[in-house]
């Protein structure tokens, strides 16, 4: 992206963030697309529940709540440093961007490790019953989205360390933050469906 | 003397460039790179759109040949021209190709070519993303046809119902080809939709507020939003089926708590909006052509726009009408039947708008207008049979018979293909700089109209007489012989009409009459640029003051075919001719707010398409290709997005 030549009459900016930026629209539309998939997953889960006489079926115990709730809270909390990092960059504070993004990234990694631990100790797999299929599908789908957020953040962090971003040129960081918020927010209904529902309904 | 400052050097460079004309500099900035690498890294929306159209029509031709083969098999009872297995693969690939590989891509592609010109910008918002979508389309479609030709085609119908398509009843890779290629293909469709929305919302010319936007652009906007919400559902369904087949999940296995009906729900939640995704761009094309030939702006513009949006929303509430015979509760079936009839209302608003626009005018009946009249005739019949099948008791008699085949071909070909051909004849002069041959065009229209009706009308009758769909042959003495014979004759007539259209198009590219910039006297912005347009579309960015910028205002103002009075001032836009730039405006009132810099040629769209292709197509053979393809894709995405231009680092 080049800067325009200095001209006293030109009123047009070239950098933008938020709805003025077409990149913002691209991320919002991607979020809409993926929300539809998550909605379809939740609908399918309840569809199978409505067909079943006992849920979870086949002697499977409802999911354990301790570890999942801990890592869910960590995931939801990671939004705070991610958002603070984004705001720091908007105010021109590059050090804040790097620091808080690193904190948020660490929280994502903890989430993934704990999730991996939970699923390696689950006593049913995806081929066990439709319940196993849905639980593993939802976990796999959502966790791969968390991995994507991780990859996006690592790429933008690398660019940040090389001095690419500033208060005006930051739409890539904003895109990562928006997607982060989406992946974290999507976990609220998914967590409620997979973990709270079979335990309390 | 001190060394010249950076600014002085830049200014000197600019002085040198003053000796090149503005046009030459723009060409240099916007043209593609030469040679094979240049062709592979091309990102211009017009070039990509033409590739899409040529490829889509190639698939259309293949699927049409499949149809001719099927009709030949059915010309008489008890023929064995085709084996049942081959027949199953043919009708599956015919349907899958027509719906996924022809109808949607070609409608998107016409939008891809025309919309940026109609809204007054220089390219779409993400040029490399467009190119990526095309390569994905080519690879996905090629995979399906290579599979068919090697005898591995999918064979469980285009809607691929379980349990027929499960591993148990369809071992082999045919269905895996369907699940992976379709999911892969939908990436291209989604990408084109995202592209279209971002372009229409942010890249319109200053002054083209939403209520001055051409109806075709509205149609493409509504269609793109529908794609955003419909496509992911079929991708979810096919991923679930792929998992059932490949790793043993139980989504559709009733013995383990799964349900085959879920496939039908997920598929038709996509499938019903899909047919409106095909129809709505066509409605936009018709509004455009009707306005031009009536030489009048569209009647009830606001109502038509609201109706387009209403059709978009309502179409998501109809899907169970494909499932009336599945034993769902009566209350839900009744609600869907009512909604299916209700959607006739906004569709009717469109038809009344066109009638009103044409009323009292004397439209010249050139080929585009003839195909529009053909659309009216055929689509209205299809709409009537649609309301008939929306009635549950009626549908219970004709479900899975040839009556339904007749109905959907009337609405899809009448409602989609006839307007598409009209659009082809209409915009051909803009794309190629030449007119299509008018006499041959008129002949091909009459042959198409008659051939189509001879082909599909008898299917209503054989459907009433009980002939089921998707059967490779039938017994004699059931009364089905005569309708089938007539249909097959009609198939050859209709196929011939397409051959003539193809010959006309190819001949006209080389020998057609030279076309002026605006042969039809139309009023929208695409007719203000030369035919064919230069790669940068507009030499000076236009400013729009009314709905049909090239037509005179009501107050007898001058027509403005060259946009003499409607150009953006250099002071405000401050053009940097050596950068790919276009105007960025606000969504509602299109007030100028910024400049967008658009990406230039890149080889990464092709590389990424190949990587994602390895992920999906490889999965048919081994799941190891999924992580391999993912890693390759990650590398390509980084290569695509990594800022390389030194200026970007300042």
Image (cartoon, grey):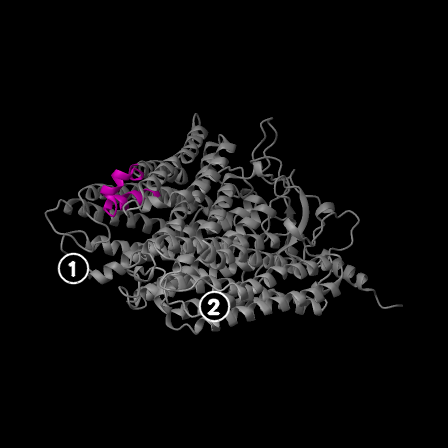
Residue position marked by numbered label 1 in the rendering: B80
Same chain check for tags 2 and 1 = yes
Q: What secondary structure is found at the residue carrying circle 1?
A: loop
Q: Residues within 10 Å of mark 1 (few under 14, many from 20)?
A: few
Q: Position of residue A177 (x, y in %)?
A: 63, 59
Chain letter of the residue beneath label 1 in the structure image = B
Asked where in the image residue B359 lies, by quadrant, the reply is top left
* In this picture, residue B57 sits left or right of residue B573: left
- How far apart are labels 2 and 1 at the CA level? 40 Å
Towards the viewer: B66 or B29: B66
Q: Position of residue A201 (x, y in %)?
A: 45, 53
Looking at the image, residue B447 lies above or below residue A111: above
> Is B492 inside the magenta-drawn segment?
no
Q: Is residue B161 in sight in this rendering?
A: yes
Q: Residues within 10 Å of mark 2 (few under 14, many from 20)?
A: many
Asked where in the image residue B414 lies, by quadrant, the reply is top left
Q: Quadrant of the N terminus of chain A?
A: bottom right
Chain letter of the residue beneath label 2 in the structure image = B
Residue position marked by numbered label 2 in the rendering: B610
What residue do we see at 24% from left, 55% from top? Answer: B70
Prevailing secondary structure class for the magenta stretch in the rendered image: helix
> Is B402 inside the magenta-drawn segment?
yes
Looking at the image, residue B388 lies above or below residue B609: above
Q: Position of residue B455 (x, y in %)?
A: 25, 45
Towards the viewer: B586 or A29: A29
Q: What secondary structure is found at the residue carrying circle 2?
A: helix
Checking the image for residue B557, the label placed there is none
| Start-end of magenta stretch | B388-411
* In this picture, residue B618 sits left or right of residue B112: left
Q: Residue furthest right?
A: B1
């Amino acid at each position: 992206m080049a800067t325009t030549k200095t001209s006293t009459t030109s009123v047009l900016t070239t950098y933008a963030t938020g709805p003025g930026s077409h990149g913002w629209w691209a991320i919002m539309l991607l979020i809409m697309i993926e929300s539809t998939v998550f909605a379809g997953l939740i609908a399918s889960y309840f569809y199978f529940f409505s067909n079943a006489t006992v849920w979870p079926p086949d002697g499977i115990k409802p999911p354990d709540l301790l570890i999942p709730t801990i890592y869910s809270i960590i995931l939801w909390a990671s939004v705070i440093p991610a958002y603070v990092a984004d705001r720091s960059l908007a105010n021109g504070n590059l050090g804040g961007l790097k620091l808080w993004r690193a904190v948020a990234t660490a929280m994502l990694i903890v989430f993934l490790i704990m999730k991996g631990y939970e699923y390696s100790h689950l006593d049913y797999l995806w081929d066990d019953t439709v319940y196993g299929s849905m639980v593993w599908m939802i976990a796999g789908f959502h966790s791969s989205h968390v991995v994507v957020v991780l990859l996006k953040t690592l790429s933008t962090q690398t660019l940040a360390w090389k001095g690419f971003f500033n208060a005006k040129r930051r739409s890539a960081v904003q895109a990562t933050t928006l997607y982060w918020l989406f992946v974290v927010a999507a976990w609220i209904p998914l967590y409620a469906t997979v973990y709270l529902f079979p335990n309390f309904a | 003397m001190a060394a010249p400052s950076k600014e002085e050097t830049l200014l000197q460079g600019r002085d040198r460039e003053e000796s090149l004309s503005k046009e030459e500099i723009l060409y240099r900035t916007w043209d593609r790179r030469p040679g094979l690498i240049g062709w592979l890294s091309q990102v211009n929306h017009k070039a990509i759109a033409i590739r899409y159209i040529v490829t889509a029509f190639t698939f259309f031709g293949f699927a049409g040949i499949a149809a001719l083969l099927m009709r030949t098999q059915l010309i008489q009872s008890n023929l064995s021209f085709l084996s049942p297995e081959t027949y199953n693969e043919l009708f599956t690939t015919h349907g899958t190709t027509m719906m996924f590989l022809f109808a949607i891509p070609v409608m998107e592609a016409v939008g891809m070519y025309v919309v940026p010109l109609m809204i007054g910008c220089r390219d779409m918002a993400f040029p490399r993303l467009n190119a990526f979508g095309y390569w994905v389309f080519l690879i996905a479609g090629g995979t399906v046809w290579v599979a068919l030709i090697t005898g591995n085609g999918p064979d469980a119908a285009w809607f691929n119902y379980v349990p027929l398509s499960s591993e148990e009843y369809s071992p082999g890779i045919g269905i895996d080809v369907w699940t992976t290629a379709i999911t892969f293909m939908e990436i291209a469709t989604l990408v084109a939709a995202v592209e279209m929305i971002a372009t229409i919302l942010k890249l319109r010319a200053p002054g083209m507020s939403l209520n001055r936007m051409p109806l075709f652009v509205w149609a493409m906007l509504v269609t793109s939003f529908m794609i955003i919400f419909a496509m992911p559902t079929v991708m979810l369904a096919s991923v679930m089926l792929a998992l059932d087949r490949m790793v043993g999940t139980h989504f559709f296995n009733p013995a383990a708590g799964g349900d085959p009906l879920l496939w039908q729900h997920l598929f038709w939640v996509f499938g019903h909006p899909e047919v409106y995704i095909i129809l709505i761009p066509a409605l936009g094309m018709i509004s455009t052509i009707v306005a031009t030939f009536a030489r009048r702006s569209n009647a009830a513009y606001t109502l038509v726009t609201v109706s387009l949006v209403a059709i978009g929303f309502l179409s998501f509430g109809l899907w169970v009408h494909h499932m009336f015979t599945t034993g769902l509760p009566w209350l839900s079936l009744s609600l869907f039947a009512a909604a299916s009839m209700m959607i006739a209302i906004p569709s009717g608003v469109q038809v009344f708008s066109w009638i009103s626009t044409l009323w009292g005018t004397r439209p010249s009946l050139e080929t585009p207008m003839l195909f529009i009249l053909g659309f009216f005739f055929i689509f209205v019949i299809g709409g009537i049979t649609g309301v008939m099948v929306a009635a549950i008791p009626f549908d219970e008699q004709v479900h899975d018979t040839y009556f339904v085949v007749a109905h959907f071909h009337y609405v899809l070909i009448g409602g989609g293909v006839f307007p598409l051909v009209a659009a082809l004849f209409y915009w051909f002069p803009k794309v190629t700089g030449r007119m299509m041959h008018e006499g041959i065009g008129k002949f091909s229209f009459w042959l198409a109209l008659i051939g189509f009706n001879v082909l599909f009308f008898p299917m209503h009758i054989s459907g009433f007489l009980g002939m089921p769909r998707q059967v490779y042959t039938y017994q004699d003495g059931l009364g089905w012989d005569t309708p089938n014979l007539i249909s097959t004759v009609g198939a050859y007539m209709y196929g011939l009409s397409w051959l003539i259209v193809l010959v006309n198009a190819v001949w006209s590219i080389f020998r057609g009459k030279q076309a002026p910039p605006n042969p039809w006297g139309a009023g929208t912005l695409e007719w203000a640029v030369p035919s064919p347009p230069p790669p940068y579309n507009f030499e000076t960015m236009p400013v729009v003051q009314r709905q049909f910028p090239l037509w005179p205002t009501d107050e007898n103002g001058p027509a403005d075919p060259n946009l003499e009075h409607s150009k953006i001032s250099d002071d405000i836009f401050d053009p940097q001719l050596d950068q790919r730039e276009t105007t960025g405006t606000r969504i509602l009132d299109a007030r100028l707010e910024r400049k967008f810099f658009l990406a230039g040629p890149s080889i990464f769209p092709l590389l990424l398409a190949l990587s994602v292709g390895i992920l999906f197509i490889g999965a048919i053979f081994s799941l190891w290709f999924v992580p391999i393809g993912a890693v390759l894709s990650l590398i390509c995405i980084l290569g695509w997005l990594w800022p390389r231009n030194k200026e970007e680092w300042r």
